[in-house]
Amino acid sequence: MKHELTCIVCPRGCLIQLVKDEEHYICTGNQCKRGEVYAIQEVTEPRRMFTTTVQIVGSKLSRCPVVSSSAIRKEDIFKIRDILDGLVIHAPIQVNDIIVENILGTGIHIIASRSIKKDA
Ligand code: SF4
């Protein structure tokens, strides 16, 4: 099976062809090893950084932006979104506070991407 994809690891955006024989992937078009690693992961277990907001109380702001500590499997995105949709956190929050530890047992944390102070 042949895959053609654009590497998104750096701005060069190499057009990569990936072909699988019986056992191995053969990668062409990439200008560095990172492109091969990206391409194989993209066709076997695609991952993305995840960002959203969660409800916060005790502040003038009603939502706190959060981000995953590393890229999560695309197939987990909707499950993680559902967990975070039902979550309410309390101000104050500091940037990089862990909001959900080891979400879905992935070893990945959901962390605050900004500080939000408590308002009276
Ligand atoms: S293959 Fe290497 S040089 Fe090309 S876009 Fe990917 S990271 Fe950049």
Image (cartoon, rainbow, N blue to C red):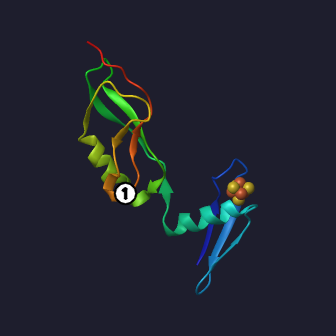
Above or below — where is 31 with respect to 10? below
Above or below — where is 96 with respect to 57? below
In the rendered view, does 39 fall on the left or right side of 96? right
Quick check: which quadrant has ligand 1? bottom right
Above or below — where is 19 with respect to 10? below
- Residue at point 39% right, 47% down? 109
| Quadrant (top left, top right, bottom left, bottom right) of the N terminus | bottom right
Q: Amino acid at mark 1?
A: Asp
Q: Is residue 48 visible?
A: yes
In the rendered view, does 118 fall on the left or right side of 70? left
The furthest residue to the bottom: 22
Q: Nearer the viewer, residue 3 or 110?
A: 110
Q: Is residue 14 visible?
A: no
Q: Nearer the viewer, residue 103 or 20?
A: 103
Q: State how many labels appear.
A: 1
Q: Which residue is mark 1?
A: 76
Tell me the element at label 1: helix
User: Where's residue 55, x and y in %?
Assistant: 28, 32
User: Where's residue 63, x and y in %?
Assistant: 33, 29
Q: Nearer the viewer, residue 67 or 92?
A: 92
- Residue at point 29% right, 20% down? 59
Mark 1: few, some, or many residues within 10 Å (few <14, many ≥20)? some
User: Where's residue 96, x and y in %?
Assistant: 44, 35
Q: Nearer the viewer, residue 14 or 36?
A: 36
- Residue at point 32% right, 24% down? 92
- Residue at point 48% right, 48% down? 49
Q: Is mark 1 within 8 Å of ligand 1?
A: no
